[in-house]
Image: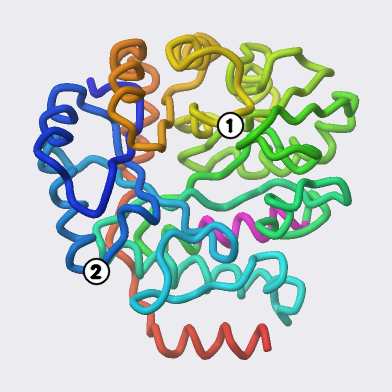
Amino acid sequence: MPGAFIFGCEGPDLSRREADFFRDADPWGFILFARNVDTPDRLRALTADLREAVGRDAPILVDQEGGRVQRLGPPFWTRWPRPLTQMSRAADPVRAMYLRAALIGHELRDLGIDVNCTPTADIAYDKTHPFLLSRLYGDSADTVAERARANAEGCIAGGVLPVMKHIPGHGRGAADSHLSLPQVDTPLGELRETDFKVFRRLRDLPLGMTAHVVYSAIDSAPGTISRPVITEIRHGIGFEGLLMTDDISMGALPGDMASRCQASIAAGCDLVLHCNGEAEDMEVVANKTPRLSEPAQDRSDAALALRSAPGDLDIEAAHAELAALTS
């Protein structure tokens, strides 16, 4: 079984050192960032080299939400507006979200990228941190769930698997978890009828990502490393898919890299996501994180079985329809 972790790499080309390390460590998959993106041909070569390093069709992820979080852009790829802005002016937000996700999926799959870390299914609140706010889809559970579902279906139609995030809900966080730890003190009953409700309606999706957020009504530890929170995700929300951490190197989490990896797996996460591509960090993750567990491997097999070629889509017509819906 592969290692229960996802790794990034340093630049637009895979070095021999990295290829050798990945061959030995055997990560479940890889994630790309702007530092890895150059021309389409160079990016296709990188995705091929990553898979060759591990000797299998490993999933390759990216965060291509559009707006603030977009790793690929002009001159080769579409510059997408912020989701909340585009949805607020759409005549049919659900159709617009589907088209947007399908078009992004087609662009990604052409490059060898087959997983997009979207939909962002957190609810927008007045206190939501600005870094997250513009990435969201609406301010009610029903609205967000409907649009997130359309996004996930568009991803799959575009040939990429969706990763819904941030389970069980990041919208009430007033801090940026890249830098510090958000604390949510909302009663559990209210959380279950709002933030958690969105993910309950999306619980059949194949892949999910945790939130580095403390839910004081459940536990004093951040969700990613909290057994009670992961139990709520599995049994309260009912999510049965493959569950990865948000980036394990973010500032919200306490402890060193080794303890973070061990705590997240002990809490019930299936995969550790490590994004910065730094060799020293990745050595620690590879040494301190186990192989994929048998239940996690089953969840992985079920998720990856959904990978398929993009469906037929008239790209020009789809862009025109989306523009008409959001003008």
Query: Where does the image place residue 320, in percent across and percent down from the top left?
Result: 52, 90
Mark 1–mark 2 Cα distance, whole angstroms, equals 31 Å
Q: Are marks 1 and 2 in contact (CB under 8 Å)?
A: no
Q: In which quadrant of the rendered view does residue 188 lie? A: top right
- The residue tagged 1 is 210
Viewer-nearest residue: 254 or 229: 254
Viewer-nearest residue: 304 or 275: 275
- The residue tagged 2 is 40
Left-right relation of 301 to 253: left
Left-right relation of 54 to 304: left
- Residue drawn at (83%, 32%), measured in percent from left and top? 191
Q: Which residues are magenta?
A: 143-153
- Callout 1 crowding tier (Cα within 10 Å): few <14, some 14–19, many ≥20: many
The main secondary structure of the magenta stretch is helix
The amino acid marked with disc number 2 is Pro
Is 148 a magenta residue? yes
